Amino acid sequence: MIDLLTSIFVITLRAGTSLTYATVGEIYTERSGILNLGLEGMMLMGAVTSFATSYYTHNLALSLLAAILVGAILAATHAFLTVTMRANQVVSGLSITLFGSGLASFLGERLGPASNNYNLVGMTGSRFSPIVIPGLSQIPVLGAMFEQDILTYALYLLVPLAWFYLYKTRNGLNLRAVGESPQTADAMGIDVVKTRYLYTILGGMLVSLGGAHLSLAYAPGWAENITGGRGWIVIALVIFAMWDPARAPLGAILFGGINAIQFRLQAGGTDIPASYLNMAPYLATILVLIATTWWENLSHRVGAPAALGLAYMREEK
Amino acid sequence: MNEEQVKVPILEMKGITKRFPGVLANDHAEIELFPGEVLALLGENGAGKSTLMNILIGLYRPDEGEIYVRGERVEIHSPRDAAALGIGMVHQNFKLVPTMTVAENIILGMTELPLVPHLEEVNRRIVEISDHYNLQVDPTAYIWQLSVGEQQRVEILKLIYRGANILILDEPTAVLTPQESRELGKIIKLMVSEGKSTIFITHKMDEVMAFSDWVRVLQHGKVVAVKRTADTNPQELARLMVGREVLFRLEKEDVTPGEVVLELQDVEARNNKGLPALRKISLQIRQGEILGIAGVAGNGQRELAEVVTGLRSVTAGKLLINGQDLTNRPPLEIIKAGVSHIPADRIGMGAVGNMPVADNLAMKGYRNPPFSTGEMLHPRRILEFARRMIDVFRIATPTPQTYIKFLSGGNIQKAILAREIDACEGLLVAVYPSRGLDVGATEAVRKRLLEQRAQGRAVLLISEELDELMTVADKIAVLYEGRIMGIVPSSEADIETLGLMMAGVTPTE
């Protein structure tokens, strides 16, 4: 039984890693007042570029760099449209998702070797394999935390750091102010435009890294729609985390867990039809949103940055 | 006198011009500020005072003009540049993040602090400054927990903490009680005695006289007068500001009250939090009568106005208009019964900011001819009507097509007044109608209310200014914790008794 729990927990954490990267990234973006609905497209682009790089170079550092770069470019586009041009954030984000998904599919069919009809599907490249830490990994259940790949281990540092930066540093304070009240931030000498660009791009990098984890570690390789809607789930996870990076892993573990269990059930053979199991994470998303909203109303606490989704212009009345 | 002439201005603004779409906000305005002195900027709403100061603080860029600080020409591109020159401003709408603490708000955007600010030390320094200037506030409290007066203290602390020595205060007393205003006056005196300089924006004459050394009067974006405060008087300033003589007293005709228009019988209602807000309210207003409601804000005034206009349901009691029972009927039925409403929240409830003045004016009559036939609107007739209203009510707007949000507060209020008075057929509910308005606009509003009275309408006037109630209303009812403490004829009312009733003391006679 303990072994079963441990193995479910191992998969849970593995499945939750890409979600955590993307959730932390989107929390930072939204804290600056920018809503980025382009996550799904950015994760797909991160997945395809990092896998293609890994296939050709077998250099994992370079693969991650490729994903970071692509995430930065797409996020910078979103920032340009919404901060500089003051375009509608929802429309811009959706366009980026549509564009990113389409381009990722296209690249998947074009970047492969001639022998495979230029398709990347079915190819193998370098991957991040789990590194088992002797001793620690023997702890019942929690030992699962020490049978992970490097990207998951990096989160053990990144999440507390992201929390500390947001709540304890001067820059974090300025970032929160920009998302809560850009008018105030501006009057206090904070560069609203620069802040919004910076954290939208930083967030985009993390989101794209989340995509890279899928194609380099979780399910190494490229497959059409490899994210399976994770980009959308992350938008709900940000709300579930109440815009606090320290809570990002909770939601990611919840959804990773649902994934792990349904995976187990499907592998073990069950009477429940597969389509119902596949639905589970998305159904859970709806339930989580209802629960979070209910709790927010109950505690009179709204976590959303007050200026989320609103363009800022200095001389506007 | 000679020593005055030797004094070098710490700040000069020369030939400042600023245009907004369709509006010339500043027209070659000039400012001179001397160290250790208070300069009052006096002007009507929309005279360009706030725009001029927003230019000084770097939020707006002037189209023309030069700024000199300590004799040197400076370019101020952002509030950061202004802060570096020691210029800080307390804005009319506070620049505070409600979800953050006092200390966090004070250090926001400061680059002099370490990456991980030592909050204990910040708190200690805040307490030091607040002790020195008698600006009591808890540095660890969240802004949303503070009263408006306390929030203003935080704004002033913020400037001092950041080392500002030229302080701009934009209508600082508009949100304060008389006691808090006096307190603020003392703080300004103390700061000035330490060599800081202050620019004080206001349209209240008594504050100019009490706080300032110099006055500059703005009209239509231009400085029309520069006076030493000691050499002028309120009458002269009012005339300079409005451009004509201002009546400080209004003529009130004798009107014999007619039929009862509004009657409330033991009305009870709850507030938004579900707590009792009105308790057994009974009152009557007759034709040609103005009933004033006095009280400290938050004692049920808002709920009372909403009940009478159908925006809030009553939990007990009856609402009768012209004898017709309209208890808990929808607002449209109450409007059709002849009720007009001038709401407290002008932009939130009284007007649609992103719609032209003309459409805002037609917003009450649009359902009926001549503005519409069936579903079709008649834009030309709406425009004709708007032109007439703009003319009759002297609404200062570039065109009837200008978005109403670009107008000054006073002119938005005149537009709402025009619409509601034109449509009024029995009862006018006016909530804080002159709040935040300058003398000229206030006078216009009060005159209109008296006109309605003379024409036999019933008026429910909710106001926080006892002066206004005593000059305009026929009777004054005092609200305290949702109860009417008593109704007195305004001819017999005195400020002392009303004040006691507002504090919940029942008069002993």
Image (cartoon, coloured by chain):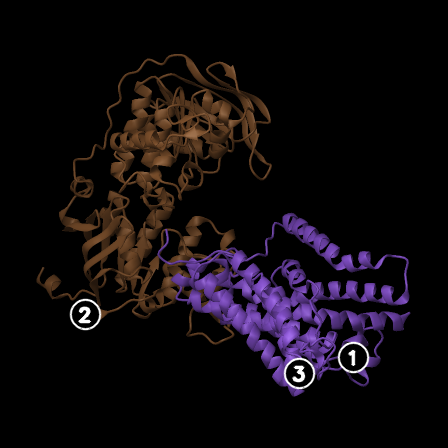
Chain colours: A purple, B brown
Q: Earlier in the sequence, mark 3 or mark 1?
A: 3
Which chain contains the residue that carries disc 2? B
B355 shown above or below B20 = above
Observer-nearest of B294 and B448: B448
How far apart marks 2 and 3 lie (CA) works out to 63 Å
| Mark 2: few/some/many CA within 10 Å (<14, 14-19, 20+) | few
B448 left or right of A23 in image? left
Please report the residue visible at 36 percent of the width from the left and 33 percent of the height from the top.
B379
Disc 2 residue type (three-letter): Gly
**Badge 3: how crowded within 10 Å, few (<14), some, or many (20+)?**
many
Residue marked by disc 2 = B71
Residue placed most toward the observer, B182 or B87:
B87
Residue A302: image x %, image y %?
59, 53
Could you say where residue A61 lies in the image, as x and y percent from the top left?
63, 85
Q: Secondary structure at mark 1?
A: strand
The residue that mark 1 highlights is: A147
Which residue is disc 3 drawn over?
A54
Could you tell me how far apart the alpha carbons at marks 3 and 1 are, in whole angstroms?
22 Å
Q: Amino acid at mark 3?
A: Ser
Element assignment for label 2? loop
Left or right of B319? Residue B359 is: left
